[in-house]
Image: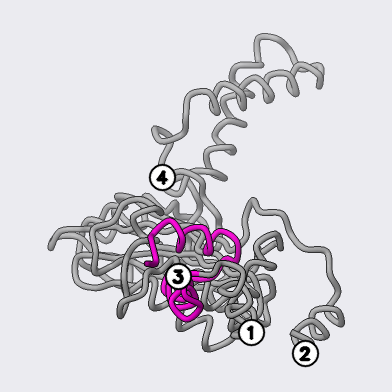
Amino acid sequence: MITANMVKELREQTGAGMLDCKKALTETNGNMEEAITWLREKGISKAQKKQSRIAAEGLGFAKVDGNKAVIVEVNSETDFVAKNPEFTSLVETIANAIINSDVSTMEEAMKLEVEGKTIEDMIVDKTATIGEKLSFRRFELVTKNDSQVFGTYSHMGGKIVTLAVLEGTDTEVAKDVAMQIAAMRPLYLDRESVPSERVEKERAILTEQAENEGLAADKLPMIVNGRMGKFYEEVCLLDQGFVKENKMKVSKYVESKGMKVLSFVRYEVGEGMEKREENFADEVAKQING
């Protein structure tokens, strides 16, 4: 009898999907060593060897369906694979599965089933068939009401993807805001959204800089406040100059259209991840040789 623990053990040893592990054990009458050999012969356990590799390329993708929207990032080892139709189809499948659910954590998302196979197993299977380590890094499922609108924007073929929610119904304004977020890389919506510790640290740095410049002590507060304004213009969406008309702040542009930005998500593929050191020739050779 094939038990769940046997399937789990084989999966941990090979990195193959649950269904493949169960089939391998069934085909080999529960013999673990023969099951490993069976998976190797089928090319399925190749996925295990790739788990230590770095996957910091990939694709960001946003999808809107009525009052729900999702933004996801799925990673691959190379940009070459990120453009592969089999990979882009996997990304869309993941996004579709999430938008049709109410999951809130990666653990829940990984357990979602598409045509009898979990997302977790699909990633393992695609890792084996595509020949690179693939990983589903993150997602955000967002909802709105009928008086609100989504704005999405994809830059550089999905290297940067944004999703914004605005109060109002003008889709062009929402797209402009999403484009702004992609281009100008804001970290926060407004000044109130910046954590107090970040504000205090920035103010301390700017104060020390001003003191080192030998500026008069009585002028320091005014100078530091001015420089804090520049800091907010860099990190806060609503304080930024609007990309299409830089003399106008984003807040004023949105207000002039009778709208209000409520929230946003910005994904840049591979941000904060360790990058591979590899030249293009090696990358092509690896693709050819599998």
Picture residue at 64% right of the left edge, 79% below the top? 40
Label whose residue precedes the other's in the sequence (2 or 3): 3
Separation of disc 1 and disc 3 at Cα?
Answer: 19 Å
Asked which secondary structure carries label 2, the reply is: helix
Is tag 1's residue or tag 4's residue first in the polypeptide sequence? 1
Q: Is residue 80 left or right of residue 260?
A: right
Q: CA distance from mark 1 to mark 4?
A: 53 Å
Quarter of the image where one finds residue 37: bottom right
Q: Are marks 4 and 2 in contact (CB under 8 Å)?
A: no
The amino acid type, in three-letter code, at marker 4 is Leu
Circles 1 and 4, Cβ within 8 Å, touching? The answer is: no
The label shown at residue 121 is 3
Q: Secondary structure at mark 1?
A: helix
Q: Nearer the viewer, residue 210 or 28?
A: 28
Q: Residue furthest left?
A: 146
Q: Residues within 10 Å of mark 3 (few under 14, many from 20)?
A: many
As drawn, the label of residue 189 is 4
Tell me which numbered mark, 4 or 2, is placed earlier along the sequence: 4
Q: Which residue is mark 1?
A: 41
Secondary element under disc 3, as helix, strand or loop, is helix
Q: Looking at the picture, how far across and down is residue 34, in whole percent?
A: 59, 74
User: Marks 1 and 3: CB-CB under 8 Å?
Assistant: no
In the rendered structure, find residue 288 and report the number of the disc placed on it.
2
Q: Nearer the viewer, mark 1 or mark 3?
A: 1
| Callout in the foreground (2, 1) | 1
The span from disc 4 to disc 3 (Cα, nearest Å) is 37 Å
Distance from Cα at disc 2 to Cα at disc 3: 25 Å
Tell me: 222 left or right of 4: right
Q: Please state the extent of the stretch shown in magenta in the rendering.
A: 1-30
Residue at point 47%, 75% (across, down)? 29
Local packing at callout 1 (Cα closer than 10 Å; few below 14, some 14-19, many 20+) is few
